[in-house]
């Protein structure tokens, strides 16, 4: 395969990935993914950081491989490495032994990793000799600004508060501290946190603004402990001017305790804190009572599910943006109305619907019509018929059904009256949600994904031998889906 053919293949694979996962996820995890070379049936990819390498390997290898196979059936394996100073190490040679069972990861030692580059409004710098990777922030998306945020009745209060926080932070003042924004997935929490970071940092590149996902916060903490630089990490956290934490529901274990200390320290030092999660603070059982009380004592703002007018406005905005990128691309009004009426789950599905139609148009040349939308968006349209089930709902209903506490399901207790309900809850989480095994494990007290897999297989085996248990689990499913 020539260099030109490889580049064209990679462009098509990226287009498929963007259509499959949506613009937000693509920008967050795949924008910096590069194809180094193809050797036989193996594609060599590279990313700039160890964290990104680990995250993609844990969550998206199969999806990437699926996109490659759709373009070239000969590609059956992936090799993922970390770039150092712009170079991927090591380069592949024919016959390099890579397991076909998974994508391999080759990452340089901490000493060879480059320090993070400074950028206005992002997490900056390193301190105390800790590895640079442990003192860098989650990537901000330049497209997630206040200008691109579409507001309506469901989110106008959250938008107003976010703008006030950004304005106050830009002027070195604090307001509504802490701010806690919560909603189900895909309703704009991440967009608002990114927008606050960009707006607050626009006037002063030296302002220490930190945006972190909960996963990244845990990664920082664990890395700092591993490299015996926990004190430097804590000191660095306490020098923050504006801290934004996303996906709070994933924070677990000692990292949650460390966040509690950081929260208290920053608020006491009159530094602004903004947190986003998928449930109100009172439902975040992985946090201790003091942290939940501190979050509840601030300004707690829910974002409601979108009504049809807001969904239509979002689709129209994304369609206009797409039309600006692709010459001759048009979204007729009936298509806009069809998407807004039929896709009711959340904003990311609306974005994904637009992205899929754009990809279908660009790949096939077929004009965007209601017929194309019906054909292309079948799975998204079906999702309106099946309510989205949250792990929090599963924990609540399973705990009530088996007369145990939710905290017991998350604990390390091994008594039979807790183990079996916990295994059933993990099985339901795998069966009824889109969460990956590692994500489910984190939600169940920070367990390993192999524990989740064992529980799922155990329950499946028990159901095959026990008709009463099968009926009981079907009852739980109906309770969750109602």
Image (cartoon, rainbow, N blue to C red):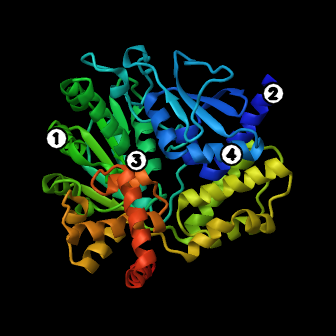
Q: Residue at x 25, y 78 (%)?
A: 402
Q: Name the residue carrying label 4.
A: 67
Which quadrant does the C terminus fall into? bottom left
User: Cα distance, mark 4 to mark 2?
Assistant: 18 Å
Residue 200 sits above or below residue 348 on the image: above
For residue 425, what is the image quadrant?
A: bottom left
Residue that numbered label 1 is attached to? 261
Foreground tag (4 vs 2): 2
Left or right for 387, reference 376: left
Residue at the spot x=76%, y=35% of the render? 9
* Up/down of 10 relative to 58, above or below: above
Residue 224 sits in quarter: top left
Q: Which sits in the foreground, 362 or 81?
A: 81
> Distance of mark 3 from mark 1, alpha carbons?
27 Å
Task: Select label 4 or label 1 by which is in front.
Answer: 4
The answer to which of marks 4 and 2 sits earlier in the sequence is: 2
Q: Which residue is mark 2?
A: 1
Residue 375 percent across, percent down from the top left: 76, 66
Q: Which residue is disc 3 drawn over? A: 163
Q: Look at discs 1 and 2 and give the one toward the viewer.
A: 2
Does the rendering let one see residue 390?
no
**Crowd tier of the residue under label 1, counting other residues whose Cα lies within 10 Å: few below 14, some 14–19, many 20 or above:** some
Q: Residues within 10 Å of mark 3 (few under 14, many from 20)?
A: some
């Amino acid at each position: 395969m020539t260099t030109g053919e490889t580049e064209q293949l990679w462009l098509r694979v990226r287009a498929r990935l963007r259509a499959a996962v949506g613009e937000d996820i693509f920008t967050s995890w795949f924008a910096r993914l590069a194809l180094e070379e193809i050797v036989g049936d193996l594609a060599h990819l590279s990313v700039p950081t160890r964290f990104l390498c680990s995250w993609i390997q844990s969550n998206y290898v199969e999806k990437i491989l699926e996109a490659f196979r759709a373009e070239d059936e000969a590609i059956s394996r992936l090799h993922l490495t970390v770039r150092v100073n712009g170079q991927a190490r090591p380069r592949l040679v024919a016959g390099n032994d890579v397991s076909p069972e998974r994508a391999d990861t080759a990452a340089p030692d901490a000493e060879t990793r480059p320090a993070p580059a400074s950028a206005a409004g992002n997490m900056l710098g390193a301190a105390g000799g800790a590895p640079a990777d442990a003192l860098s922030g989650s990537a901000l998306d330049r497209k997630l600004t206040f200008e691109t945020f579409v507001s309506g009745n469901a989110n106008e209060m959250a938008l107003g508060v976010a703008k006030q926080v950004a304005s106050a932070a830009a002027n070195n003042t604090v307001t509504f501290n802490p701010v806690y924004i919560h909603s189900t997935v895909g309703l704009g929490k991440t967009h608002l946190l990114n927008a606050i970071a960009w707006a607050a940092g626009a006037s002063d590149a030296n302002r220490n603004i930190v945006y972190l996902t909960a996963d990244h916060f845990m990664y920082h903490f664990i890395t700092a402990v591993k490299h015996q630089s926990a004190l430097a990490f804590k000191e660095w956290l306490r020098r923050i001017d504006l801290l934004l934490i996303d996906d709070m529901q994933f924070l677990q274990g000692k990292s949650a305790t460390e966040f509690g200390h950081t929260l208290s320290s920053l608020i006491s030092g009159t530094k602004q804190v903004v947190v986003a999660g998928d449930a109100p603070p009172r439902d975040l059982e992985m946090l201790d009572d003091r942290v939940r009380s501190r979050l509840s004592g601030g300004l707690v703002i829910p974002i409601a599910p979108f009504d049809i007018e807001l969904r239509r406005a979002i689709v129209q905005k994304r369609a206009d943006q797409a039309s600006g990128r692709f010459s001759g691309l048009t979204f007729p009004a009936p298509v806009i109305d069809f998407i807004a009426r039929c896709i009711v789950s959340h904003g990311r599905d609306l974005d994904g619907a637009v992205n899929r139609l754009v990809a279908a148009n660009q790949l096939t040349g077929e004009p965007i019509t209601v017929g194309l939308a019906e054909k292309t968006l079948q799975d998204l349209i079906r999702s309106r018929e099946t309510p989205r089930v949250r792990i929090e709902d599963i924990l609540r209903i399973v705990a009530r059904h088996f007369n145990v506490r939710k905290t017991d399901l998350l604990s390390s207790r091994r008594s039979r009256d807790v183990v079996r309900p916990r295994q059933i809850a993990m099985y339901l989480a795998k069966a009824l949600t889109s969460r990956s095994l590692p994500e489910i494990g984190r939600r169940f007290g920070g367990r390993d994904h192999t524990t989740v897999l064992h529980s799922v297989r155990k329950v499946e085996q028990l159901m095959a031998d026990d008709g009463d248990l099968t009926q009981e689990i079907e009852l739980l499913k109906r309770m969750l889906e109602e």
